[in-house]
Structure formats: C-alpha cells, structure tokens
C-alpha cells in the first residue's frame, strides 16, 4: 500500500488537498452564514468589493513567482539538490517580498482614492487599509507553499490553508463576543481584521515547516544551503523572473478584468433601476452566498489541478504522450460526471439550501441557475492545468481573456436590460466558451 501511494503522488496529494479543501470550505460556510446574518446582504456586498484589490495584489506580488518556484524545485525529489532549491526559494521570496511591501504601502496610502475611483464605494476605504497589512504575510506562505507543491509535499500547504481558516474564523468570533460583552457594535471591519490574523497564522506555520524540512534533509550541513555565491543567486533570480513575469502579467490582466466585472455589477444594477443599497445587497447575495456554495465541490478539481501541472510537465519533457492522453481523458470524463452529479444536487436542493443556510430565497434562485456551471467549470479547470503543464500558458491566458470579455459584455449590456439574470446568463455563456476552447486545444491527445 505504501509503495502504491509513493508511486501515485497525484492520488495522494489530491486526497490531502481535497480533504483540507473541504474542511476549510465547510468552516468557511458557517463563517459566511454568520457574517451574512450579522451584517446583512449589503454588508456582504461591501465586504466582497475589496476582493478585487486583494486578487490584483496577489497577482502582482506572488502569483507568478509561486509557480516559478514550484517549477524550479520540482527536480529536488530526484536530484536531491537541496542547495539549488533553497537558493531558488530564497530568491523568489526576496523578489516577491520587495514588490509586496511596495504594494502594501501604495494601498494603505491611497485607500481613499482606490475606494472612490476604482471600487466606486467610499465605505471600502478603511477595509483596504486593514487588508493591505495581509499582503506581505500572504507572500511569505505563498512562496513557501510553491516550494512544497514543487516537491509534492502537499501536507504543508494543506496545513497552512486549514490553519489560516481556523484562526481567521476563530479570531472573528472572539472579537464579536468581545463586542457583545462590552456593548460595542460589530462592523464588517472585524471580518477583515480576522483575515489579517489568519494570514499571520498561515505564515508562521509555513516558516516553521520549511525550516524543519531543510534541517531534516541536511542536518549536518544546514548552513551551507545558502552560501555566499552571488553568481548563483543572480542566475536563480533571472530564471525565476523569466517565468514569473509573463505569468504575473497574465494574472494581473485577468484579475484586472475580473475586478472591473465585480466592481461594475452593482453599478449596472443601478442602471437597471435599483438603488445603491439594493444593488449591493443583490451583489452580496450572489458573490457572498450563492457562488461560494456552487464552488464548494471544486475543492476536488482544484486539488487535482495543482498536482496535474508538474506531472504533465514531466511527461511532456520525457515525451510520455500516453500519460498526457490519460490525463486528458480522465479530466474530461470525471469532470463531466462530477459536474452532472452536483448540477442535479443543486437543482433539487437549491431553494432549500438558500433558505436554510442564508434565509434568502434569492440565494436559492441563484443556486439553481448557477448549478449548470458545474460540469463546465470542472472540465475547463483541469484541462487548463494540463495546458499549463504542456507549456501552453499563452493559450490558457487567451482563453481566460476571451471568456472574461464575454462576461463583461453581459455585465455592461445584459444587466441594464435583464437585471442580475443578465449576468447569470453571461456566466454560463462565458464558461461554455472557455470549456469548448480548452477541449479543442487538447484534441490531439483525445
């Protein structure tokens, strides 16, 4: 049994990440129910509006570097070249941290301008100042997680994810009961403070884990992992940047378009005829209640995606076409079957879940419509990871961009005519386009 598990890192890693993903999302569900009942749909809408800024920050600071670190340390499991891995990790960490500090200072100093001119909601300004403090901490554990993904030790990223969720939710509950005890009024800012505390916990776990790892693998020569050798650091920085910069630019562009989409949904709902409070409430129900429920089962496919990339990369490098074909066939087959299963579940129980979890019939209606996304999302996400593993990152970027442009078309032209249902149809149409494009891209491996 142990030999089988070692020879199947995709299965082992997927089980670990999936179990942790489900545990984190399970905790997150009760947390979102708590927040929605405490702050209402409008409060959830304001809270969700800061997500684009956080996503853009992650894209700019560490998204590309995390993937680059994973790629260049992946050979450690075979070569046992811990020195090279440590140099790549430290270089990636320093480069990302420099950008993250600049990003933190910029968001903190210009929070009012970002809130009014970019997010179109001045009440997000204090939330932005708080959330800016989490960016360096997220950079630390993201770099370290990239290292552990590369060497296929998924237990550490899984532990970081779980600890972040538990500490974040726990801290917000503690703050809430502290407010009740002293007759203070809780605000949505407390949820953002909890996010910063959770990122701090995840950072500490990752730092302890990476130190223990290197001390374990080279206990007698721990200090030699990072020698004074400037040419080695320069070469490692160049290699990382060559891969990380294009990836980061792609992610920044994609997340910028996603930010525009998220910001303008309430704005276009107002053109349809709603007032500001109602528009934010509908946006909060959709993005803070219904979509998280639809995305809950994707913990399975997300885990597979993380581990498919290095496995397909190795197969492509060794011209192992059989492994690639097998990955493509199984991604399409099981993604479709899993998607159909959850579509059926959400169709049958959508209204019940909306009322039970969020006391919102609107959330139940959204869940029913969005249920048709499941098979499309699962197939597109796994095939996208395979394409990245084949080195076709340009294609995945173009497909994501095209899909987003379809959605933006529905945001700007569909919502003013059809209300929020114009956006729901846009989600379905854009995901269908992306899925078909991904299937077309891997046609020679089918």
Image (cartoon, rainbow, N blue to C red):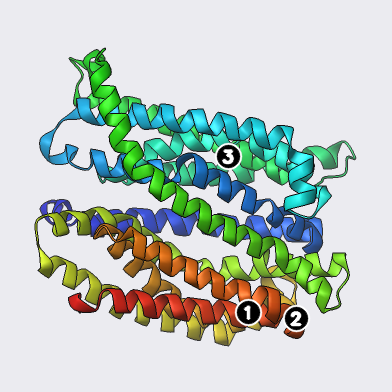
The answer to whether mark 3 and mark 2 are in CB contact below 8 A is no
Cα separation, mark 3 vs mark 2, equals 36 Å
Q: Which residue in the structure is indicated by mark 2? A: 419
Between marks 3 and 2 in the image, the one whose residue lies nearer the viewer: 2
User: Image point 62% across, 76% down: which residue?
Assistant: 409
Q: Which residue in the structure is indicated by mark 1? A: 424
Residue 166 position, x and y percent, is 55, 45
Residue 269 position, x and y percent, is 78, 73
Instruction: Pick whichever of labels 1 and 3 is earlier in the sequence.
Output: 3
> Up-down: is 60 above or below 201?
below
Dot 1: few (<14), some (14–19), or many (≥20) neighbours within 10 Å? many
Q: Which residue in the structure is indicated by mark 3? A: 198
Quadrant for the C terminus, please: bottom left
10 vs 402, left or right, is left
The answer to whether mark 1 and mark 2 are in CB contact below 8 A is no
Cα separation, mark 1 vs mark 2, equals 9 Å
- Circle 1 sits in a helix, a strand or a loop, which is it? helix
- Circle 2 sits in a helix, a strand or a loop, which is it? loop
Instruction: Pick whichever of labels 3 and 2 is earlier in the sequence.
Output: 3
Residue 214 position, x and y percent, is 26, 26
User: Image point 32% across, 41% down: which residue?
Assistant: 242
Residue 38 position, x and y percent, is 79, 56
User: Image point 24% across, 38% down: which residue?
Assistant: 73
């Amino acid at each position: 049994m142990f030999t089988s598990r070692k020879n199947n890192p995709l299965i082992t890693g997927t089980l670990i990440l999936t179990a942790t993903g489900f545990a984190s999302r399970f905790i997150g569900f009760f947390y979102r129910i708590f927040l929605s009942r405490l702050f209402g749909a409008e409060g959830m809408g304001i809270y969700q509006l800061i997500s684009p800024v956080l996503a853009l920050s992650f894209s700019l600071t560490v998204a590309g570097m995390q993937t680059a670190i994973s790629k260049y340390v992946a050979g450690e499991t075979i070569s046992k070249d811990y020195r090279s891995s440590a140099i790549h990790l430290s270089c990636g960490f320093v480069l990302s941290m420099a950008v993250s500090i600049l990003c933190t200072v910029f968001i903190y100093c210009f929070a009012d301008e970002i809130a009014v001119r970019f997010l179109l909601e001045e009440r997000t300004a204090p939330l932005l100042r708080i959330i800016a403090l989490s960016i360096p901490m997220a950079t630390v554990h993201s770099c370290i997680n990239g290292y552990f993904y590369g060497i296929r030790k998924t237990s550490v990223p899984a532990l970081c994810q779980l600890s972040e969720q538990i500490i974040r939710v726990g801290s917000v509950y503690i703050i809430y009961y502290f407010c009740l005890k002293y007759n203070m009024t809780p605000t949505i800012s407390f949820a953002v403070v909890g996010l910063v505390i959770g990122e701090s916990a995840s950072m500490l776990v990752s730092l302890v884990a990476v130190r223990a790892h290197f001390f374990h693998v080279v206990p007698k020569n721990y200090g030699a992992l990072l020698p004074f050798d400037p040419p080695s650091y320069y070469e490692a920085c160049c290699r990382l940047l060559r891969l990380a910069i294009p990836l980061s630019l792609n992610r920044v562009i994609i997340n910028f378009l996603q930010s525009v989409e998220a910001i303008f949904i309430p704005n276009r709902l107002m053109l349809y005829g709603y007032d500001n409070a109602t528009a934010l409430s509908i946006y909060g129900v959709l993005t803070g209640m219904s979509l998280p429920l639809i995305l809950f089962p994707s913990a399975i496919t997300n885990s597979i995606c993380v581990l498919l990339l290095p496995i397909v990369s190795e197969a492509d490098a060794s011209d192992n076409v059989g492994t690639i074909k097998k990955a493509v066939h199984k991604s399409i087959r099981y993604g479709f079957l899993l998607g159909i299963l959850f579509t059926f579940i959400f169709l049958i129980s959508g209204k019940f879940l909306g009322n039970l979890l969020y006391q919102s019939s609107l959330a139940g209606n959204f869940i029913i419509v969005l249920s048709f996304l499941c098979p499309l999302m699962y197939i597109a996400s796994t095939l996208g990871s395979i394409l990245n593993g084949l080195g076709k990152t340009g294609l995945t970027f173009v497909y994501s961009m095209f899909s987003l442009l379809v959605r933006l078309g529905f945001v700007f032209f569909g919502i003013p005519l059809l209300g929020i249902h114009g956006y729901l149809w846009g989600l379905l149409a854009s995901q269908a386009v992306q899925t078909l494009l991904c299937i077309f891209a891997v046609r020679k491996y089918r």
